[in-house]
Image (cartoon, rainbow, N blue to C red):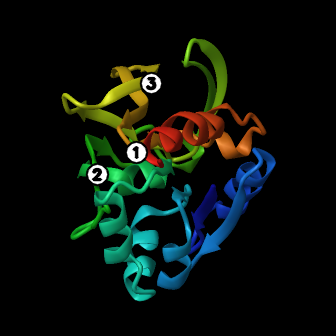
Amino acid sequence: MKIGILALQGDFREHLVAAKTAGHAALTVRRPEELAEIDALIIPGGESTTIAQLARTFELFDPIKQRISEGMPTYGSCAGMILLADRIIDGAVGQETFGGIDITARRNAFGRQIDSFESDLDFEGSSLHAVFIRAPWVEEVGAKVQVLSKVKTVQGTRAVAVRQGHLLATSFHPELTGDLRVHRFFFDQVCAGAIK
């Protein structure tokens, strides 16, 4: 499988390493021609408005949105979750998303950079150490969305990992921990089910 990592801004290098370590061909995506070469896409953490604006500048926004709507397996971490959400709360004025997952994501839900934290979560029946950096959370999920992981907050329990068919999103950054279980779930479960 050829995995593309959207490399316009954010921590795309760590996802590139994770994909290669998991045994897949991986390349950075900055141009429409590179997008056309891949089987699946990872949208990294970073700044969601900046990634969307740069995708527009590099003429990638509409092609990515179209490939997602046509069934290309896509995984978004942190800012990537925001960009895969159909709806956003606390977004910048006019903020765009690629969409595809029937969720409402609250941008910077856990607070500012200084409020970043780490926590152990249940993911696929086992404990997973998660890193949250200015992370979103999922405020609402549609009927077809599967919640894979939750975290307890002072505001209640919030979904932080979701899947809808060929799309996966996490609020946290598994690429920063060296634990490949989320990436392997994407490659082995999400991509395998979508790519024939």
**SS class of the residue under badge 1?**
strand
Q: Are marks 1 and 2 in contact (CB under 8 Å)?
A: yes
**Residue 148 sits above or below residue 43 on the image:** above
Ranked by sequence position, the earlier of labels 1 and 2 is: 2
Ranked by sequence position, the earlier of labels 3 and 1 is: 3
Ranked by sequence position, the earlier of labels 3 and 2 is: 2
Q: Is residue 129 left or right of residue 138?
A: right
Q: Are marks 3 and 1 in contact (CB under 8 Å)?
A: no
Q: Which residue is mark 1?
A: 167
Q: Residue at x 48, y 50 (%)?
A: 76
Q: Residue at x 72, y 53 (%)?
A: 24
- Under mark 3, the amino acid is Leu
Q: Is residue 139 left or right of residue 195?
A: left
Marks 3 and 2, how far apart at CA: 17 Å
In the rendered image, the residue lying farthest to the top is 125
Q: Nearer the viewer, residue 191 or 159?
A: 191
- Under mark 2, the amino acid is Gly
Badge 2 density bin: few <14, some 14–19, many ≥20, Cα 10 Å: many
Of the 4 image quadrants, the one containing the N terminus is bottom right
Q: Position of residue 52 (x, y in %)?
A: 39, 71
Q: Which residue is mark 3?
A: 148
**SS class of the residue under badge 3?**
strand
Q: Position of residue 147 (x, y in %)?
A: 37, 25
Residue 31 appearing in the image: no
- Under mark 1, the amino acid is Leu
Which mark, residue 100?
2
Marks 1 and 2, how far apart at CA: 7 Å
